[in-house]
Amino acid sequence: MSVTRRLIAVVLLVPALAATALWAFAWPAARTAPRDLPLGVAGPAAVTAPLEQRLAGHGDAFEIHRYADEAAARDAIAQRTVYGAVVVTADETELLTASAASPVVAQLLQQAVTRQAAADGTAVRTADVVPAPSADPRGAALTASVLPLALAGIMAGAAVTLLGLRGVRAALALTGAAVLVGMVAAALAHSWLGVLTGGWWAEASVFSLSTLAVSAAVAGCAALLGPAGIGAGALVMMFLGNPFSGAGSAPQMLPEPAGAIGQWLPPGAGTTLLRSVAFFDGAAATGPALTLSCWAVLGLGAVLLGARLRSRAAGADAAAAGERAPALVG
């Protein structure tokens, strides 16, 4: 490629990447609003019917789940089926929230329900069923952990590729690096900062699996596509996985299909799994754990497959060179 063509490529590529990054990060932030946000309503049907009608007036903002009483609603919140619940009785209205699931959603529900109750001339009592830790009441530390973990995974995948590690050695290096990243992250977030309150080893495992899912994906792309695979994997994780993760609010607060896409990528699945393990005793952890495991297994499989394909290609080239050698000697 001539110098002029390379100059033109750089001039066009950089603005395109900047526009993509701005779209990926700014669009979800500018369109943050509840969309089919799971919300429970508990109480006798005769009492809750007016409330449900008023909630339906918000369009598709809420996905209503009906429960018989407060105990059932609290259990649904603890199981991560809903983000909160409104318990209505003949005497009072109570709003149950879970700031550990999302401080932004808890605040949104409190504002919406309180405003509606004020219009009706009634008071609302609020109870935080699963509160966020006092060291991180706004969830800022957990949100801030998404980007460093993604960067650690990208750097590990790139390092393995650029250092020439292949096959089993590459897989072992990726796994070992992910395990160490998980332990360091748990030591910082749990032991030092105190922003996570679950089991230490469970949290370290989530950090490790999240890192491995990213690093294996990047290294796997590079093993199959060459060095360009590093860029492809990094772009997906950074420009889609990070802004679409919903870490700062909730997947249901992002415009579609960003929320759904984010949960199928390691940063979003890792954030959801970390919340479940750290604050909800592992409730609703199966889905995101399977997502991360699939990324890790497929990525490591691609690393091994890429090494085997390279080995076969090298063997074929050596055989072809051996066939040509006698002819040259003759």
Image (cartoon, rainbow, N blue to C red):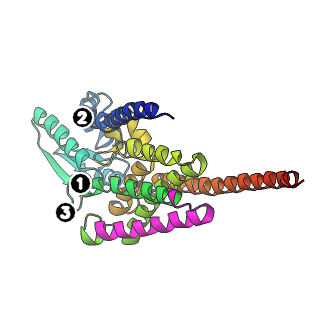
Q: Amino acid at mark 2?
A: Leu
| Quadrant housing residue 172 | bottom right
Q: In the rendered structure, does residue 112 fall within the stretch colored magenta? A: no
CA separation, marks 2 and 3?
Answer: 32 Å
Left or right position of 119 against 84: left
| Quadrant housing residue 141 | bottom left
Q: Amino acid at mark 3?
A: Ser
Q: Which residue is mark 3?
A: 134
The residue stretch that appears in magenta: 162-190
Give the secondary structure at mark 3: loop
Q: Which residue is mark 1?
A: 140
Examine the residues drawn in magenta and state their main secondary structure.
helix
Q: Nearer the viewer, mark 1 or mark 2?
A: 1
The image shows a total of numbered marks equal to 3
Residue at 29%, 57% (x, y): give it. Answer: 142
Left or right position of 196 against 121: right
Q: Earlier in the sequence, mark 3 or mark 1?
A: 3
Q: Nearer the viewer, residue 158 or 89?
A: 158
Q: Earlier in the sequence, mark 2 or mark 3?
A: 2
Q: Classify 10 Å Cα crowding around label 2: few (below 14), some (14-19), many (20 and above).
A: some
Is residue 303 placed above or below 228 in the rendered structure? below
Q: Classify 10 Å Cα crowding around label 3: few (below 14), some (14-19), many (20 and above).
A: few
The x and y percentages for residue 275 are 35, 57
Give the secondary structure at mark 2: helix
The x and y percentages for residue 6 are 44, 35
Would residue 121 be visible to someone looking at this image? yes
